[in-house]
Each structure stands twice: as structure tokens, then as C-alpha cells.
Amino acid sequence: MNDEQRRNGVPRTLFAKIWEDHIIRAQEPEVPAVLYIDLHLIHEVTSPQAFTTLRERGLKVRRPGQTIGVMDHSTPTIPRNELGIIPIADIQAATQLETFADNCRKYGITMYELGHENQGIVHVIGPEQGLTQPGMTIVCGDSHTSTHGAFGALAFGIGTSEVGHVLATQTLLQNRPKTMAIQVDGRLQEGVAAKDIILAIIARIGIHGGTGHIFEYRGDAIRSLSMEGRMTVCNMSIEGGARAGMVAPDETTFEYVHGRPFAPQGADWDAAVAHWRSLPSDEGAPYDAEIQLDASQLTPMITYGTNPGMGMPIDGRVPDPDQETTVNERSALDKALRYMDLQPGQPLLGQPVDVVFLGSCTNSRFSDLQQAARIIEGRRVADQVRMLVVPGSQQVKAQAEAAGLDEIFRNAGAEWREAGCSMCIAMNGDQLAPGQYAISTSNRNFEGRQGKGGRTFLASPLTATATAIHGVITDPRTLIGANN
Amino acid sequence: MEAITEFSGRMIPLPRNDIDTDQIIPARFLKTTHKEGLGQQAFFDWRYDGDGNPREDFPLNQAQYAGASILITGNNFGCGSSREHAPWALQGAGLKAVVSTEFADIFRNNALKNGLLPILVDEETQQQLLSLAEEDPTAEIKIDLTSKTLTLPGGRPVGFPIDGFSRHCLMNGVDQLGFLLALDEDIRDFEREHPPRVNTGVPETPS
């Protein structure tokens, strides 16, 4: 859009406004746009090779003050020792964490190390610290950077080469993506959560339905979600193939951001909010694609296969490969069911699980833990089941402990752990044994994602916790109301 | 980076759809701080059994595909995480190109930045290449960036799309960082007009 069109009041989407606000060099047919990045989040796994590039080329970090580091992926979540330290047994992980700390120190980047009061999963701490704000461009070497789009930011995951580009220049070369409006209206039933909305969307469009696009989630069902619920939805945009997902900022957003450590204050706050109010998509703004979903018809969702698109209502039956239309789909589903050791047509309600994982950048925030605690209070994790509760950050952990949630989980027989990515990516020692079944509040059920040979059912915190209580996949609606 | 204009190579068939980056390189191998040495871990959990022995039925382990450099896969390759370790591992395993009907956005970006070519073809060509690779492991195809074509053994050329900028970088052996560094003046101008939105060095005290 040029200035003339803008003056003429051509309606623009939330995405278009942020994109155009950050253009340093306009896109040409043979050259992508150059986009300015407001905030760069880095962690230990995808940054070391980027720092190596800086060293090899004698480059500095252009804007250390717009960069923040945190340890989360390869960090243990086992309890602290008598010195208050979380010990790192894995030498490779220890080296990676040391390298990260060293790089951040040398290049002058603020970094929250393992056990620091602000440490946690990168996509939990950005919002928590007030670093994530509407209208920003935010990147991180992690595909779940889409989470920050919940604030009306343009946030997406990048590879390590691009981490190097942003460290050195605070910019990225990007081709303008297409937009898809995902309109979700209607009121969610009791026991149905933000996680169920996004699992239903991905089940509908498939894991590559959003390739080349960014999503804007709209409609009253999205507006009624808390910021934490919106983060859950945006988090899994990448599971639908979209690099980013966004929700227009509103009063809920402003209320969440206000007063956080890095949020604007005083007159700056007023100016920021005035700008943020101009960001929502204009009436009649064009999208390249649009889908609609009726939230009132949703039930709790569960996945049965080996990608997040293989999901269904919790009371559904596992689909039959013979009913699939193409050879490709038949063979993909057949392989998935063999890996999961599930039969076509079988219900998942009543399916035993070995492990329950409550955590990850999708569902490890205070309200996730609180909802889970409400239904497990006064009940027990089934005897043969291991339940791990991994708060998303040290701040979430402290808040939960102040509210007594840790006691509720411990009394129920669950493990109360330190903050981190943990069993979502299973690179820190928290993992499934081959053949084990887990119900997990995380975002990926790929083969071996939670440990080699492990099998994952993705679900909401409510569904995962209800399942922990019975030891078999359970509809959380059967437990809600009985306790409250 | 090495300049690439054209090359020929033999093919390895891997006819599975939706191959995600956790399969290309499992997360437990991401504790490295280097790019090198990941080839051994490419497709690790498909390539080796529980005891660490190579699975004979996996194409990457089969003698007839040793030295092949072009992976022919099912639909939608590279979904999932942003790990650039995925293209590093594939290159470490000797691959120069991956052929599919669709690539996940982040994987495609990462691959292009490392000189691993994501070659997009239609389903008919994909099926033809898969059959060919299975029937005749010695068959070679040619990939040419100048003409943006993949040439089948019989000589039939099939065009593939690639964005002009990536193609320029690949053919000249330059990376994108140099281009961005040269924009220093423009970046400065932008920064003058747009003060930083946050300063991570100085958290404000909440009022």
C-alpha cells in the first residue's frame, strides 16, 4: 500500500498494518522485503551457531537492548538441591547452556539463566515480563514464536541463519505472506477450552492448511478468551502450517500488559495504548482466505495420530484408513495408527495412558495449572500413572505455589517440577519410554517427539487432568461440576 | 557458501507424507553447538532399531542408494519445528536436494540459506521419480538453477519454482547476511524515526 491508498482509507488488516509499519526496504519481484524486528528472543538450542557466524565475520550484536535470552529447552526440571541449584547431569546440555551464557555475556545481552526468578519457557516469559506488546515484530529461533501473536504482534519462528541476521542487523528478508481469517463465534461449553478450539481448527484444515499464510483469529469466541487462552490458540498456528497467528489487541490485552516490568509507563503507556487501538483490522479489510468455526458446537478434542491435524472430538472413534479417499491419505493414516497401536473404529475414551504431561509453551501458564488443580483437588492420580506438572516459568511456579496449587498436585500424587520445555520436546531427560502412552497438553504428537517410541495424545489441561485421575482417557465434562 | 548452478545425482526414495523435522533429526541431537556432524543423526529413529542397528528396509541404509544426493519424498516435507539442524543433518548425510509437492515455510527458508535445494514438483512428477528411484537406483536426474528445471533420465525437463533472490544467492555463492549488512544506512534511518519499543537492559519498575 502506498501513501495515497492510505489517505484514501483503503481498509487494512492487523497484519498489513504491522507489516507496513516495519518495512525498511519494500518488496520487489526479485527481492523480498526487509523487515525491522522490534524484539528478538533467543535460547540455548538455536543460537550457538548464529553467534559463531558473528565471531567468524567480526560482527557485533546490533541491538542487545532489543534482544533477550533465556534457558529453557535443554534445562532439567528436577528439584533444586540443598544449595538451591538445579543440577545439570547431562554434559552436552551443560556445555550448550554454558556456551549460551557466555555468548550473552560477551555480546551484552540480558539473559535469564536456569533457576533465575524470571527464567522459563521463552514464549511464557516474553508476555510475562511485558516484553511482548501489540504492534511489534517479534522473532525467535523457535516455531512456537507464533504464541506472541496473541497480543496483536507479528511474531514468527526463524532458523539459525536468520537468528544471525537479526543479531547482526535487527532485520530480516521476508516475502509478504498471505492472510487467512479464522472466524470463531459462539460460546464454548463448560469443559471446552482454548486448546480445543485450536485442535479443532487444525483437524479441519490439516497441518499444511496454513502454509504460506498467517492466521488472524477473530470472532466473539476469541474475544472472550483470556490472554492465556489466546496464547494457547496462537501458539499452535504453526501446527496448521502458518508461521504466525494473531489476535487484535483489545482491553483484555491492555489490562494484561499494564504494569508488567518492561511495559510502557505513564505518558508512554497512554501513547502506546492510543497506537494499539489503531491496530485492529479495518472493516472490510481483505483476507486471502477465510474459514469459520462455531465454538458452541465444540467438544473437548483429542488427537489419535502422529501429527496435530489427526484430531477428533473426545467421544469420537479412530478413523478407518479404508475410508480415506487417496492412496496417500490411506497410507499416512495406516502408518500413524500402526505407530500408535490403535485400531480403526475404536473409541479413545477408556484408552489407558502411562504418563500425563501438564506443561509446554501451549499450556503451562497459571490459568492452565489452576484449571487442572480445580478438578484434581481432593482426588488422586491413578496408581499406575505418572503425572508431571511443569510450570512454564519460575514466575508461574511462584504464583502457583502462593496459591497452594503445588500442594494440590503433590497431594494428588503428581510431580511438581521446575520450569522449562521438559517433556514437550524431551531433550532434557524428561521423556517417555518406548511404547508408553502419554496424554499431553503440549503441541506436537510426532513420532518420538516425547521420547523415542513414545506415543502422544494431545489435549487440553482439563482433559489431561481428568485422564490422570482415571488412568484412561476421560471426558473432563464428567468431572466438572462434581467438585465446584 | 559454494556457488551452485547445476548438478546431477542419483535419487533416494522416501515415499512418506508429512515428514516432520522431529523425524529428520530428533530433538535429543540438538544439544550440539555446531552445524557439523549431524549427518549420522539424520532420520535416526527410522534408520536404526532400538539397539542402534541399521534397519535394512530403510533406503538410507541400502547399498544401492549409497552416494545418492537427491531425496524424493511424499507430500508436505519439513513441517514442525524451526530447527536449522534439519537441513544441516540432510546435508551431512550427503544430500543436495529434496523433492516434494509441498514444503513447510520455515524448512524451505532454512534449506535455501544452506544450499540444500527444496525442489517443488507436481504429484505426477513426484510419483514418476519415486517409481524410478525404486526401480533403478542408478538413474540420475539433473537439477539446473539457470533454467530452473529438473531433467529426468529420458531428457524430459520439468520446471520448478524458486524465488529470484534465493536463486541469485545460491548461484553466486553469497549469503543473505551480506545483503542486509549493506543496508546499514537504511536501518539507521529507520531506527532514528522509530525509537526502540523495549530496552531489555533496563526493566522499568512497575508503578
Image (spheres, coloured by chain):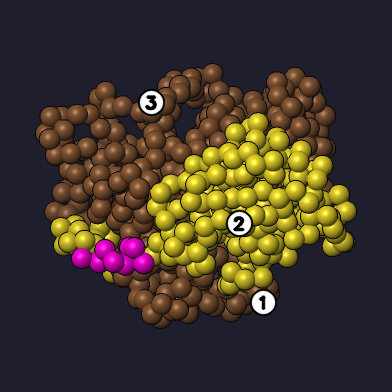
For this orientation, the residue located farthest to the front is B155
Question: Which SS class for mark 3?
Answer: loop
Residue corresponding to mark 2:
B7
Disc 2 from disc 3: Cα separation: 51 Å
Look at the numbered discs 1 and 2 and tell me whether their residues touch, using CB distance below 8 Å: no
- Label 2 crowd bin: few (<14), some (14–19), many (20+), radius 10 Å: some
Q: Quadrant of residue A220?
A: top left
Could you tell me which residue is drawn at 32 percent across and 56 percent down? Answer: A37
Chain ID for brown: A
Question: Which SS class for mark 1?
Answer: helix
Magenta segment boundaries in residue numbering: B178-185
Q: Are marks 2 and 3 on the same chain?
A: no
Residue corresponding to mark 1:
A91
Disc 1 from disc 2: Cα separation: 41 Å
Residue corresponding to mark 3:
A219
Looking at the picture, how far across and down is residue B95, in whole percent?
66, 58
- Label 1 crowd bin: few (<14), some (14–19), many (20+), radius 10 Å: few
